[in-house]
Each structure stands twice: as C-alpha cells, then as structure tokens.
Image (tube, rainbow, N blue to C red):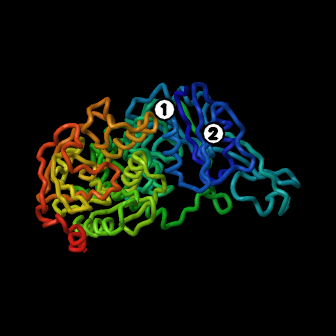
Amino acid sequence: MFDLSVIIAARNEEFLQQTIDNVIANKQGKTEIIVILDGYWPEQGIPMHPDITVIHYEESIGQRAAVNKGAKLSQAKYIMKLDAHCALDRGFDIKLMADCEYDWTVIPRMYNLHAFDWQCGKCGNRTYQGPEPTECSECNNTKQFEKVIVWKHKTNPTSEFYRFDKDLKFAYWRDFKSRPEAQGDIADTMSSLGACFFMHRERFWDIDGLDEKHGSWGQFGTEMGCKSWLSGGRQVTNKKTWFAHMFRTGKGFGFPYKMSGKQVGRARKYSKKLWLENSWPKAKHDLKWLIDKFAPVPEWEDYKFSTSKKLTKGLVYYTDNQCEERIASTVRKQILKSCNGYQLVSVSQYPISFGENIVFPESRSVLTMFKQILRGLEEINTDIVFLVEHDVLYHPSHFEFTPPEKDKYYYNVNTWKLNAKDGQALHYYTQQVSGLCAYRELLLEHYRKRIDRVEKEGFTRKIGFEPGNHPYPRGIDKVGFEDWRSEYPNVDIRHGKNLSGVRFDKKQFRREPTEWQLADEIPFWGKTKGRFDDFLRSLN
C-alpha cells in the first residue's frame, strides 16, 4: 500500500504533532508515518489519519529499539528514520526514492529548524527558541512569555558532510565541501548526524538494523556510516532535497531521553569495539579502509590500526523451565565447566541465575522457543554462537569447534540419547538444534525469517526445527549445512517433558535410523544403565 514508511520514535516530544503535520503536508508519494510512542502519550493525542500508524509502549524501550520496531512493522520498499522535531522539503519522498540504489544510505541536506520563539506578553518582543526567558531584553518583563510556533527552516548554516574523530565521536566536516568528490547533487559522506536517514527497508535488516547493544541513544551516525560503508555499500548526501532539525540549546530545553555521561560512555565503548577492533561480522572492509577512502581525515593522520581480529564465541541457552531441576542444574554446571569462559546468554520463562539472564514469559510452544533463541541472539555480541539446551550435557570438546564458513550451519552429530527412567543409552545419526553452531549474523537472519513465517503460516514438520536441513522453499532459506563430530559426545537427556518425543525403539521412526547403537554406557561419561540418579550425582 505504501512505498515509504517514515519512522518517528518519540519520547516526551513537545513538537511531535508539528513534525507529523509537516510530513503529511509535504509528502507527494505513497508515504505513511509510523509513530512509536516510547513510554508516554501526548497530552493532545494524535489525530486519526489513514496514513498514520501509532504504536504505544507503556514503558520506554529506548530509541534504537523503537526505530527497529517501526521498521519491522513497515511493509514499504523504503524506510526513513526521522527525529520527532523536524521539517521536510516539499516532495522529499519522491526525490529520495528517485536516487537510492539498494545498498545506499541517503542523508538529505540538513538545515536548522526555527521551531518557535518566546514572545513577551507585555511588549511583544520575541526571543529565539531555547529555555524560557527569565527577563525580556526590551522591557525587563520577568513573566508572561508565550511560546509561538514558527516552524521554518534556516538555510544558513547548511550541513552536507560529516565525519567522526578517532574516538568515534560525531563531527561536522564543512571543509570537505570543497573537495572534488563532494561535488554534484549526490555525494559521498563518511558519517551523519543520525537524525534522519533513508534506505531500502530490506537493506536496513541486511545490516542488522540499529544495534541495541549501544543502548537507547548515542553513536547513531557513526553506526550507520560504518555499517553503510564497511558492508560494501555507500552513504551519500542528496542535495536535491532537505530536512530541517531542531537543535536543543540548554537547560529546560534538552534531550527527552534520560542520558547520563556513563550511558554515553558505554555507547562509545561498544562502538569502539565494533569498529576499531573490526568486530562486526558483516564487514567486507575494515575501518582503515574507510579512513583511507576519505583521507585526509582530521585527527586520523597518525592513527595506528589493529591488523588482526580474533573470532569470539558465545552460548545462547534457552529453556521453558519444564525440565526437573536436578537435571537442569546439573546441565548448567556442566556448561559452565565446559564453555571456556565464553559469553553466556540465557533466555528462560522464569528467572534463573545463569549467565546474562533474559526472562521471556510467553507460554510454552514451538514459536516461543524460536523467539527465545532470537532474543538470545540479539543480546549476545560474539561472532560465533552455540545454541545450548537445558537438558543436554555438553563436553568441552563441543565448544572447541570453529565454523569454517560464515554462510553455513554446522551440527555436532556426536550425540547420545539417555533415558532418564532407566539409564538406557542410545546413539543414532541425527541433527538437532541443541548441537547447532554457526555465525551469529547467519542465525539472526534465519530466526527472524523463521518467526515471521511461523507467525503467518503456523508451524509444521515440513518447516522443521533445524536450520538448513529442509530444502527451500519447504524450509526457511537456501543456506546449506555440514555435520561435524566433537572428540567426545554430548548427552541428550530424555526425561518425558522434552518438546520433541522420546524414542528408544526403531519402530517409532518413519525411516530406519542409521548408526543405531544401544549401550549401557557412553564414551567418556561412563556407565548409565540402571544408575541414572548416581550418574547425575557423579557430575555435581
């Protein structure tokens, strides 16, 4: 229905309605507005309009998360992130859509927005926007000041080019305007302010949307600039159109999100890890490439770049809390002994003390499991991720594996089943999610698609649980898989409350399983038959 979604994340925004009205007045194409009210509701409400969708969160989720929610709701070809205190050029939408390749991030030329004046109630003198005056400069009146809306853009100064310094802090780059590569209506820009950007919606998710690990706010421009360029794409200024941004100027006229110096520092620290340490898995270039492309860049002339990158590994543990505690606690202890200190994110339906715990209180279902996995993948920040479950004993050799390729799923098929009733051990060839390891970015993309499909069509065995082993289009994507075997096996405990069934008889299978082996003991782990309780106690 729409070609463009303008996404406005708002938190205690005084001028949200003026911004919405301005977008409606100046759009000329099939453009909608998606407003995310992040933890508040405007006193006057938002008038109904067929081109406006409003999402309200009772508690604030943060600006980055709000923009991501808006982009997920959009079905348009393009999206545009816009601050809630901006004005736009007439026909901005059709002008931006006319010049946007798939892998571009486009920044309109930026002006300052003259949003309002303070008018003296005694003499009528006006004071430019900012904190409310304490005294009129003309008549010395100390009260009765009225806020008068102006809402006009100022063509001086004009901002077209931006960069960041060696601390990855945003900076205007006015001198760049005179360089040959800055000429023309469409020109490269190293970074941007972050108040407004335009791009293909699918491209936004190709580069992982906005990374919420930065926190709510801070480093927007650096993040989008680095992602746009280092992914192999391009970021440009479109001088054919513009947006005007209202800048806050002091106490009583500040940022609507609470933002401490510590929060800003954390955002910048995380940003440095991504870009200075070349830790973003989707990067086709490193940061040195970007600096060299725009060289000379002020403050970067003598910077010494790191030349190596060590792959990081982590675990996403997901549980429906249905496994009896004596088993689950033993599994958790074994994971901690085996995982080599890797980052561990747990996603549970009830709080547990295990790694970085996220409570996900939806009722038990296949879809909930997929959502828990995705939530853990979004939280963890390692290159490689092992998916681990609450009823599988993992051997340390499992976590020694490193996937050779970024675009493939890898399954450890050295797994034994263990019947909790009688201690019977069984091995047969199978791939299962609890043995899956892959690059985080590949898993993120897969589970986003998987959840979207299951929400639309429901879950069937045709889709399956395991990424990669169901051919597309029956499966989720066209990504392949490979098997591998750890030096020693993992132990999958079958306790009666598993999401998948307990099968220890060949007759329970539609096709005869391969590598079928019933045993009284498991390599490395020892004897289990007839002594399951003793076996568990021996691991504690």
The reply, left or right, for residue 235 in relation to residue 387 is right
Residue nearest the viewer, comparing 46 with 278:
46
Seen at 33% across and 48% down, the residue is 296
x%, y% of residue 67? 52, 46
Residue that badge 1 annotates: 78
Q: Quadrant of the N terminus?
A: top right
Q: Quadrant of the C terminus?
A: bottom left
Residue type marked 2? Ala
x%, y% of residue 456? 46, 35
Q: What kind of element bears circle 1?
A: strand
Looking at the image, is mark 2 or mark 1 nearer the viewer?
1
Total tally of numbered discs in the picture: 2
- From what the image shows, is residue 331 above or below residue 361? below
Residue nearest the viewer, comparing 152 with 214:
214
Seen at 39% across and 46% down, the residue is 366
Residue nearest the viewer, comparing 524 with 347:
524
Res. 87 mark = 2
Residue 302 in sight here? no
Residue type marked 1? Tyr
Question: Can you tell which quarter of the image residue 391 is in?
Answer: bottom left
The reply, left or right, for residue 114 in relation to residue 395 is right
Question: Can you tell which quarter of the image residue 39 is in?
Answer: bottom right
Q: What kind of element bears circle 2?
A: strand
First-in-chain label (2 vs 1)? 1
